Image (tube, grey):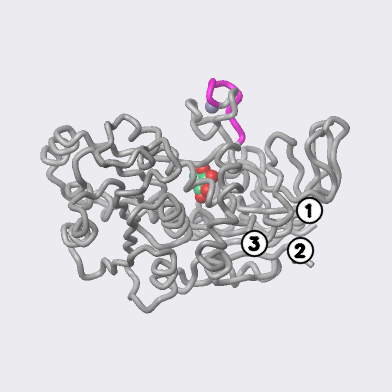
């Protein structure tokens, strides 16, 4: 069967043939891949020419955002049957640390995990994949056409969950019990700034809006672009950062209430993130989900930065990957995200390509694209 990925010592992205996988263990499931989303990680690995290929192998199949349909199940598989739509989680635990042994490999302590389509394991930019039942999350029938967004939404679900868990430390300062960090409408009476209006930033903004937060989103594109329009469509406010200082950006967010409670970094914009920290409010939290690539050296007043973080009880937290629970949360919310914000997921899908047109998909410039979806086997 056909697959798209990277080959050791051969720059760029390539199409090649690999054997169709077979079920070998009773808990395995054979899935026919339907759609695969591409993200910054995929484009970054290809652009930088830094695939993480398993030892003894000479290539890796890319693709970690996927939805597919079960074709065949092993004897011991209980929760899935042929015809069910599924999404695969990305990380496979190290098998050593407790988080990995207890289904939280997103919090792996050894770093010896693998990730499908990213670190060592083949991904889903191909026609069929086999994996264990426990790594598959069943997609309700009515959601199959949105489900390629489950993985990126799960990343954002985890980021927001970190905010809620950590900020539950605060004796919250508003008269509405329903705005406590434990509740669904935790964002009420709170202001959030999302950095980046790409897929993660838009999905984060959507969840922040569903939680009732006053939400601002900053990026470096003009206001008449699709990214900015999608931000406004979510009921968030777009801020073009190109001509503003970090202080000015935060001032815009703080104008209504005086406080910026949450910063959600979703672009890997390393300098912007660091420059914004000095303007965050007391007891605020900054969560990072974007992974910057390459190096970037800047000068900062480290003493002032640390002094402020301490004096203001601030939290700077990173959040990577997601586990099965976050995928389930994503599938709980994905229908609402799409319908509440008039089909935002299809609007975010700026480009669709057949698997054989992968070169075009990877060659697009990132100013015109939000989400690129590869249609491996179109839904009928
Ligand atoms: C994926 C995560 C993964 C991370 C680092 C992201 O693009 O969505 O699942 O953990 O890359 O490899
Ligand atoms: Zn581990």
Report if residue 296 lies within the magenta region.
Answer: no
Residue 209, image quadrant: bottom left
Q: Residue at x 56, y 67 (%)?
A: 343
Q: Residues within 10 Å of mark 3 (few under 14, many from 20)?
A: some
Q: Look at the image and tell me in which quarter the C terminus lies.
A: bottom right
Marks 1,3: beta carbons within 8 A: no
The earlier-in-sequence mark between 1 and 2 is 1
- How far apart marks 1 and 2 lie (CA) works out to 8 Å
Give the magenta range. 92-99
Q: Which mark is residue 47?
A: none
Question: Residue 273 vs residue 330: left or right?
Answer: left
Question: Residue 70 vs residue 106: left or right?
Answer: right
Secondary structure of the residue carrying tag 2 is loop
Q: Which residue is mark 1?
A: 32
Q: Which mark is residue 14?
A: 3
Q: In terms of secondary structure, what is the magenta stretch mainly?
A: loop
């Amino acid at each position: 069967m056909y697959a798209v990925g990277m080959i050791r010592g051969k720059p760029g992205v390539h199409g090649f043939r690999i054997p169709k996988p077979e079920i070998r263990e009773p808990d395995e499931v054979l899935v026919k891949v339907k759609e695969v989303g591409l993200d910054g990680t995929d484009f970054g690995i290809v652009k930088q020419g830094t695939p993480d290929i398993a030892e003894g192998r000479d290539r890796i199949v890319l693709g970690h955002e996927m939805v597919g349909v079960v074709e065949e199940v092993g004897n011991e598989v209980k929760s899935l049957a042929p015809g069910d739509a599924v999404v695969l989680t990305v990380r496979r635990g190290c098998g050593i640390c407790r988080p990995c042994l207890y289904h939280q490999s997103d919090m792996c302590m050894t770093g010896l995990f693998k990730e499908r389509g990213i670190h060592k394991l083949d991904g889903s930019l191909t026609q069929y994949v086999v994996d264990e039942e426990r790594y598959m999350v069943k997609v309700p029938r009515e959601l199959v056409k949105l489900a390629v967004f489950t993985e990126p939404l799960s990343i954002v679900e985890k980021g927001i969950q970190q905010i809620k868990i950590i900020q539950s430390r605060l004796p919250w300062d508003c008269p509405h019990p329903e705005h406590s960090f434990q509740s669904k409408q935790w964002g009420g009476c709170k202001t959030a700034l999302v950095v980046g209006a790409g897929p993660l930033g838009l999905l984060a903004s959507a969840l922040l809006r569903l939680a009732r937060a006053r939400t601002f989103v900053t990026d470096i594109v003009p206001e008449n672009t699709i990214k900015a329009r999608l931000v406004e469509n979510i009921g968030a406010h777009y801020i073009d950062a190109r001509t503003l200082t970090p202080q000015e950006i935060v001032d815009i967010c703080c104008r209504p209430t005086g406080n910026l409670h949450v910063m959600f970094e979703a672009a890997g914009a390393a300098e912007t993130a660091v420059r914004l920290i000095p303007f965050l409010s007391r007891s605020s939290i900054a969560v990072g989900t974007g992974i910057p690539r390459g190096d970037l050296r800047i000068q900062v007043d480290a003493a002032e930065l640390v002094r402020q973080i301490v004096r203001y009880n601030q939290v700077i937290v990173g959040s990577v990957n997601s586990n099965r629970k976050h995928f389930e949360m994503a599938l709980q919310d994905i229908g609402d995200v799409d319908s509440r914000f008039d089909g935002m997921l299809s609007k975010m899908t700026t480009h669709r390509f057949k698997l054989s047109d992968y070169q075009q998909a990877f060659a697009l410039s990132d100013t015109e694209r939000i989400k690129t979806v590869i249609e491996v086997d179109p839904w009928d």
